[in-house]
Amino acid sequence: MQLLKVNSIEMKNNLSYLLKISIILAIAIFIIERLLFNGGFNQPINELVKVFGIHFMYAFVLSLINGYFFHYLEAKFTWKKHSKKRLIIGCWICYVNNARACFVKICNNSCNFREPN
């Protein structure tokens, strides 16, 4: 459990960095999705804000999980001693996490959660 101990200043810096990365990812995914799918930006602003909020939540959770995982991985396997092992484990876990998030996103999109008129 000593691996996850960080001081409060480092945690604040990490959280602000995580929020910045999540916002950048959410904006990129939002723009790509709007340009390629779902009819572009021709929706009411409140629908666009909802969609962006969903993208931000996915980006934030994935960034948080991946960040803590790689922090843990750095403590277990250093790049100098275990570079191949770390690369394989890191790629596999990122693939699994992102595939799981895509599966949840696809399942959410296939269900129609719109309010009745």
Image (cartoon, grey):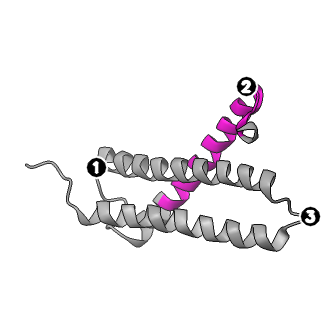
Q: How far apart are marks 3 and 1 (CA)?
A: 52 Å
Q: Which of marks 2 and 3 is in front?
A: 3
Give the image location of residue 3, x and y in percent: 75, 41
Which of disc 2 and disc 1 is earlier in sequence? 2
Q: Which residue lies furthest to the front in this view?
A: 1
Q: Name the residue under label 3.
A: 80
Q: Is residue 78 left or right of residue 116?
A: right
Q: Give the range drawn in magenta.
A: 4-29
Circle 1 Cα neighbour tier, 10 Å, few/some/many (<14 / 14–19 / ≥20): few
Viewer-proximal residue among 17 and 44: 17
Which residue is pictured at 77% across the width and 71% down the height?
85
In this rendering, the answer to whether 36 lies above or below 104 is below
Give the image location of residue 101, x and y in percent: 45, 61
Give the image location of residue 52, x and y in percent: 42, 50
Viewer-proximal residue among 67 and 55: 67
Residue 62 visible? The answer is yes
Give the image location of residue 49, x and y in percent: 38, 45
Asked whether the residues under the numbered discs 1 and 2 touch, taking CB atoms below 8 Å apart as contact, a structural biologist would say: no
Viewer-proximal residue among 99 and 57: 99
